Image: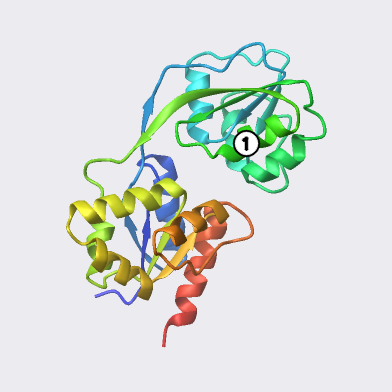
Amino acid sequence: MSDAPTVAVFRPDDDRLERAVALLAELGTEPVADPMLAVEPTDATPRTDAEYVVLTSKTGAELVSEAGWDPGDATVCAIGPATADALREEGYAVDIVPEEFTSSGLVSTLEERISGARVEVARSDHGSPVLLEGFEDAGAYVHETILYRLVRPEESGESAKLVAEGGLDAVCFTSSLTVEHFLEAAAEAGVREDALAGLADAVVGVIGEPTAETAAERGIDVDVVPDEATFDALARETVAATSAREP
């Protein structure tokens, strides 16, 4: 039996999950892949009259490309490097990536230049209100297009059962929705309270402050919030915290 720490990861079941599992294995852990998000496209596309277009995910980049979206003269903004890389891979030029890879970081980057401008935010149905409110407060005319909905896969929940039995050493939550879906899966399996108790004994890593707040509101103590909101940083810091706990 392996002595490697078990670490659950909840990324969508595509190349993001594959890369996450590979990184966790490279870091000396035994990854537990339990996708908590699945994508349902809406077939909508961003408005063409916007001066600034904001995309917040790799999925969004791929969907607008599949739909043949043309940004025209709009300033294309990505919330972070992963989204920017995905847009470039699809052939789009990226004009702005904030230094802080968060909604508030993007608001801070744009707020001095968007007063009176038309800003289009193209993302999932579970986007943070921080972007819309921040842009509106900066004087922009804001429109949101829902590119896709995020739902919980029916087969999800293996990690909830494992942690309820004390079988997980750490978890990596990558959004508020992964926290909510994890707890929904635990409740469906009848192990919600045991899962919460198991998380109290495990290392809980989250990708940013909004996710940390969601976890705390639901009774989950958070141990790791990396300064950089990327999965790479989350994985490395969570594994380091897990190793530090080992006798």
Percent across and percent down for residue 25 are 41, 62
Horizontal side of residue 75 vs 62, given as left or right:
right
Q: Are there few (<14), some (14-19), or many (20+) residues within 10 Å of tag 1?
A: many
Q: Residue furthest bottom?
A: 247
Label 1 sits on a secondary structure element that is: helix
Residue 74 in view, yes or no: yes
Horizontal side of residue 12 vs 59, given as left or right:
left
Q: Quadrant of residue 139?
A: top right
Percent across and percent down for residue 111 are 77, 35
Q: Is residue 165 above or below residue 74?
A: below
Residue at (54% x, 51% y) in the render: 210
Q: Quadrant of the C terminus?
A: bottom left
From the image, tell me which residue sits under label 1: 131
Horizontal side of residue 191 vs 83, given as left or right:
left
Residue at (72% x, 33% y) in the render: 137
Residue at (38% x, 39% y) in the render: 14
